[in-house]
Image: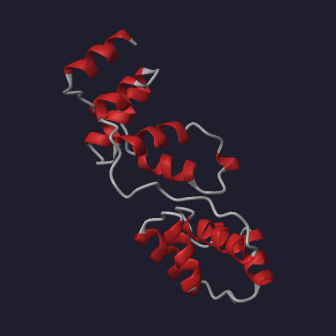
Amino acid sequence: MEHFRTILRAKNYAPSTIDMYCRRLQRSGVNLHNRRAVHRHLSSRRVEMEGDAQGNDYRAFLLYDRFLRNSAIPGGHPSYQRSDLTIREACLAQQSREDLLRVWWLCEVRGYTPGVAVAYVRDSKKDPEKDRHRSVHRARCALEKFNIEHVFITDKVIRDYYRKL
């Protein structure tokens, strides 16, 4: 497991993500030394059905399966620093009034970063049938309590852009 952690660190995964994935793998009850057992568990739909609301178990097993097969592991975030994207830039990049309001609401009310808010608004429109990583589910959960009538934009530039849409 330590070698797996080292590879994820080298790929710029956040320490909290590495810890979570390793905990989930170890608590799964799957023989992590048996490549077939890991792959069989990944291939079964069990991973998604056993309370894995955010898809963390699936992603952990996907990475670990790739690790065991010596396949390419996708990189994590290039750095652990926050993005330079501002709420204003994120809102001004939206093409519809509702998307703009959703991004604003996710940032101002729910406290998400602008990059995550934009991704959630985009992902919430995708087909949930092809949602193996549970990104659509996470996006829809984040927007679950969104009410267009309770959003008030305090930034004048964003308000003006909203009116033009």
- Total numbered labels placed on residues in the image: 0
Residue at figure coordinates x 64%, y 64% from the top left: 73
The colour scheme applied to this rendered structure is: secondary structure
In this picture, residue 40 sits left or right of residue 117: right
Outermost residue toward the front? 10
Residue 132: image x %, image y %?
66, 56
Residue at figure coordinates x 71%, y 73% from the top left: 65
Residue 8: image x %, image y %?
54, 70
Residue 158: image x %, image y %?
28, 22
| Above or below 138: residue 147 | above
Residue 63 vs residue 144, the one in the foreground: 63
Residue 131 vs residue 49, the one in the foreground: 131
Residue 15: image x %, image y %?
41, 71
In this picture, residue 27 sits left or right of residue 89: right
In this picture, residue 146 sits left or right of residue 49: left
Where is the N terminus found, in terms of image quarters? bottom right
Residue at figure coordinates x 77%, y 82% from the top left: 35
| Above or below 76: residue 111 | above
Residue 130 vs residue 86, the one in the foreground: 86
Residue at figure coordinates x 65%, y 74% from the top left: 64
Outermost residue toward the top? 164
Where is the C terminus found, in terms of image quarters? top left
